[in-house]
Image: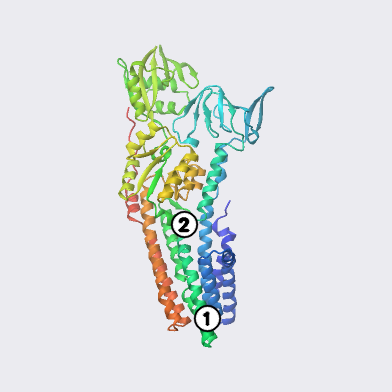
Amino acid sequence: MRPPWWRDVALLPSALSGVFLLVGFAFEWTGLHFPALVLQWAALLAGAYTFMPGAIRRLIRGRLGVGLLMTIAATGAVLLGHVGQAATLAFLFSLAEALEDRAMDRAKEGLRALLSLIPDTVRVSRLGGDITIPAADVRELDIVVVGAGERVATDGVVVDGRSSVDTSAITGESIPVEVVPGDPVAAGSVNGAATLRIEATANGRDNSLTQIVALVEQAHARKGDRARLADRIARPLVPAVLIVAALVALFGVIVGDPWTWIERALVVLVAASPCALAIAVPVTVISAIGAASKFGIVIKSGEAFEQLGTIRAIALDKTGTLTRNEPAVVDVRPAPGFTGDDVLAWAAAVEASSTHPLAAAITTASAGRSVAADVVEAAGHGLTGQVGDRIIRVGNVRWLDPAAHRVSAESMAALGMTVVVVECDGQIAGLIGVRDELRPESAETVRMLHAQGIETIMLTGDNERTARAIAHAAGITDVRAEQLPADKAAVIDALVSERPTAMVGDGINDAPALATATVGIAMGVKGSAAAIESADVAFTGHDLRLIPGALAHARRGRRIMTTNIGLALAIIVVLFPLALFGVLGLAGVVLVHEVAEVIVILNGIRAARRPAALRDLAATPALTPEPART
């Protein structure tokens, strides 16, 4: 685990450089020049240690960047006898690099949390009886025994037993899936109330869950090579400055006055040093990230902040992101001769002792509090019990035929509901529709994104019918349903190739897509550790309206950053010819650089101001869920 910043040894060189530099300048102001020089050298060496060796190694491999230009500028300042200026450059740049590296490391931590979904041990059926072995030792074709409430250790096919399986962590399906012999089950799924025997189709070390880990690692590796904005600017700047400085020195040799022109060449290098450019991006990023954190928006790196301001499309997961991930009764359709209250009360009485998520939704919606007697469960189908003098059966449409009510059942299913059939004394009493409802702010969030010119896509592992019903209510027209984790990552990869795309999710199944996206955004309140760690941005709040607010904040920060970079480059463009023709000496060049740095810092601090979108959100009372329709 990464230590807190005050104990992080990676920040130690920059901290020492800053302390040495501060004390050295204090000594210089009091007239103690020799101790000041020693401390400035110490500050220079401590700061340069963090980037100079790496810049030289990249140069050997033919790669240029801001680090090389900073190295040359610091060297030039030393050769001209201005160690303090060189130390200042080294400290500023080393601190910016250290903070950036620390932030980037956060995105790589916690990936192994994915594997916590696999149990340490499993029961495997052998000829002599069931034995317990490490999950990693499971081999293909082993018969794995999974008890009620236990997690499935590896991918397999049910060979015995009927049960419901919670696959929300893997596929995003909010409603547990009924499984019977012959149905596939994914690693990491949670078994329901009945024991299952599953024939393993993958070993314990190479299954769909471990493949999710590999997908996330590969996505992070691809994104790790993305150049930052300052480096992209430095690529053409570095060789141009080096060539001009070399030509200046060569001119001095040709005209017979080498030392004058070599000194002027070094002044040119200092004039072209990206002092302001080196802090233009970090000061803006740090200010903006700090401001965002006050609103529950955790941006993990400067690169993530830069990319967040470029987003043109957003893919949103359904379960737990657009929806509450809390199934609720949204419709009750009694048969003639029965009332909706009776249908709900009977179903709740039978379901009172069940642990199925649908049972919780039904008992919550019912005003009755009676409990059925002699309840018997038909695994994977439903329940039978006695309420008063009536025999009540509650189950799915595959077990209890809706008969004359089939049209109603199909219309409810078309609206994204899971249909529960209630039977009283052999007669259909009614239908109950259960659905994972939209968050109250989901539709508003989508409208706000569209108003910003951002395209929205729903990307979910849920079934097509449910996904389209929820997407229609949210105002999303582009729906990609029944997507496995690898499918989601592939869709995001295709979208990213066309335009900068963000992915918003909260589950294990979203982790590869979050890592593949230009910017991955995790909903942090109920989000899995794997999703949060795979993302570039995490929300500690639950309000989806933070998304358009965060995008507006990032765009504003990017504009400030661009202004700062333009100012930094303008300073170089102005100073370069003045230094080249001897109009300004080193002192004048240094003075202009220092003034420019102050202006850039003050402008960058503006990024800490609260953007209007987040101000409005903070002033708006939290939305409350609408009551379920019964």
Residue 261: x and y in percent read 51, 84
Q: Quadrant of the C terminus?
A: top left
- Residue 534: mark in rendering: none
Other-residue count near label 1 (Cα within 10 Å), few / some / many at <14 / 14–19 / ≥20: many
Residue 37: x and y in percent read 58, 78
| Residue labelled with disc 2 | 303
Other-residue count near label 2 (Cα within 10 Å), few / some / many at <14 / 14–19 / ≥20: many
| Secondary structure beneath label 1 | helix
Badge 1 amino acid: Ala
Residue 249: x and y in percent read 52, 81
Front one among 476 and 123: 476
Front one among 157 and 627: 157
* Residue 292 position (above or below residue 419): below
How many marks the image carries: the answer is: 2
Front one among 428 and 459: 459
From this viewpoint, is residue 207 visible? yes
Residues marked 2 and 1 touching at CB (< 8 Å): no
| Residue 429 sits in quarter | top left
| Residue labelled with disc 1 | 249
| Residue 576 sits in quarter | bottom left
Q: Tell us which disc is closer to us: 2 or 1.
A: 1
Badge 2 amino acid: Glu
